[in-house]
Image (spheres, grey):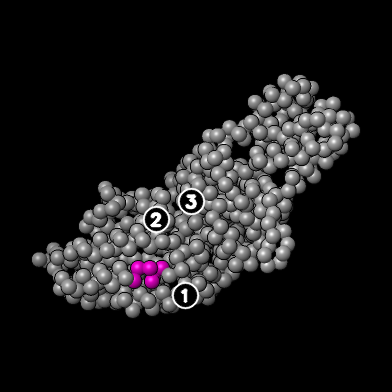
Amino acid sequence: MAVRFADLLQGTPVFVNVGVREFGDSLREAGCEVIDVDWSPPAGGDPDMAALLDDLL
Amino acid sequence: MKKIVVRKNRYFDSVFLMRVARRIASEPGITDASALLATPANRQVLAGMGYGDGGRDPEFAAAGSADLVLALEGEAAAVETAAANADAYLARGSGPAAEADGAAGRAVPRPRSIAEAVAARPDCSVAVISVPGEHAAREARNALDQGLNVFLFSSNVSVEDERALKTEAARRGLIVMGPDCGTGYLGGAGIGFANAVRRGPIGIVGSTGTGMQEFASIVHRAGSGISSGIGTGSRDLSDAIGGLSTMTAIDALEADPATAVIAVLSKPPGAQATSALQQRLARCPKPVVLCLLGASVEQAAGERAATTVDEAAVHALRAIGIDEPPSLRVDNGALRRRAAAEIARMLPAQRHVRGLFAGGTLCYQAQAIFRQAGLRVYSNAPLRGMPTLDDPDQSVADTFVDLGAEFFVAGRPHPMIDAAQRRKRLEREGRDPTVAVVLLDFILGAIASPDPAGDMLEAIHAVRDAACERGGELCIVASVCGTDGDTQGLDRQKRTLEGAGVLVFTTSAQAASFCREAALQLAHRDGAR
């Protein structure tokens, strides 16, 4: 469910961390809920191929 | 029978969709299932297979690339059941990878995409994205499609992608903080490179990461705190982007009852963006501090206009009834006397100031402080009117280097995380007998090195010893950005530097002001000879 940014400031954000693991860790240490995405470069790291696969799928 | 199910504005990554399709196809009575984004090419293929009434079905025909289509074939009852459960399949997928949590022995889901994360936790509200730049726009777009606000740390995102992402975010009532956004504060937590600061009534909108860190740290040390700190990305107030995220952030802070005063921190905006920003701020019912680092007099005009982070913090604190902290008062006479004492111990050949910055904003601010005195400084990230350093690796006369610039960090860690590059540069500057003063910034907080001062200590001793052996003295000046809550320990970092003979100032602006006094005296001494 989308949380409008204006509402977000008055609530408790729940984070999705995509990439640098420490960003999620430091948010957790600050008491936040964080969902880590086990991210890896799509399409073997080829953005054009990733875009192509996105189109195909 | 064949049936399509269209879900508007639903993005799932390809692996997830393949899992969904595989799972549906494994259900009894289903002979074929596809889960696709409704791109023109995909729609054409599905229409050719006889789905969507050969493409004439209005919902199917109207579906676009951001829409999801489930194409189902099989026994009528099974197809109808699968179609009715479409959202459940999409919510669960085939289940994200899970691993046992060693401590609790329970399964911990490990989503492989933002979509899976949102499917698993529909109350997610912010995606923190720090993937390589070439994949960043895709991930940010993905996050927006999932209804997430985006904190986009990644750089190397095109202006076109940035504008498109921010326009989409605005349409949905969301925000893209970034790209190239290093710092934020939401819900009392720091995001990215952030110092430990208490919550309080001051809201920040900033296109400058280290500027926000410096501001928040000053506010904390003065006894107040930050309601929210909203990074917007270094280009947001360019005319190409038009302040899309800045405007969203101002709207949000204006509506936020926890925010009493709003501070906007930026490098000088584009002309059109300046006009739009000033018009927006003029109708803000809350006190607004506008800090445009290196701005022209016209841009910086206004009751609470500031040209340094320190000034901005003082304005913001005053707006909530806190007097200027004594530690922020600059006594230029005292700075002059201190600079004179340092210069008296130097050799005549020593005449240049070299700034080696980890924080890009602080490099910019220091140039602005020198410019106020009519001093020229070479830089790889020059303020308007300052000469560009032809070779970022080679200082010329007075030079301020932003060691976090792309030239230095391509394939290497940022100097706030790893001091190796700056250590080498300091050693090189120390071998230059014309160098009189070296200016350094130390930035504490999350993600940063666990001991920024300690990382540089050996090099500091080495260059000071070398200067002594030449018969002179090298003056090393530093500021430490941080708070008592930072794991590196603000006092410990300061003591480490002071123990090595470094002149430590409370803020980067004060350190730069001292260097300005030194540079003026060095220039005067040269002129007098």
Q: Which tag, 3 or 1, sits closer to the chain's start?
A: 3
Quarter of the image containing the C terminus of chain B?
bottom left
Which residue is at the front of the view, B182 or B270?
B182
Where does the magenta region start and end? B452-457
**Label 2: which residue?**
B404
Q: What x and y, as percent, mark residue B68?
A: 71, 36
Dot 1 falls on a residue whose secondary structure is loop
Q: What x and y, as percent, mark residue B402?
A: 35, 56
Predominant SS of the magenta segment: helix
Which of pointers 3 and 1 indicates the residue nearer the eye? 1
Quarter of the image containing the N terminus of chain B?
top right
Tell whether label 1 touches label 3 (CB within 8 Å): no
Q: Is residue B352 shown left or right of residue B448?
A: left
Amino acid at dot 2: Gly
Residue B56, located in which quarter of the rendered image? top right
Which residue is at the front of the view, B229 or B435?
B435
**Chain under numbered label 2:** B
- B187 to B3, vertically: above or below: below
Q: Could you tell me which residue is drawn at 60 percent across and 67 percent down?
A: A29
Q: Which tag, 2 or 3, sits closer to the chain's start?
A: 3
**Chain under numbered label 1:** B
**Label 1: which residue?**
B489
**Label 3: which residue?**
B180
- B485 to B88, vertically: above or below: below
Note whether residue B125 is visible. Answer: no
Amino acid at dot 3: Asp
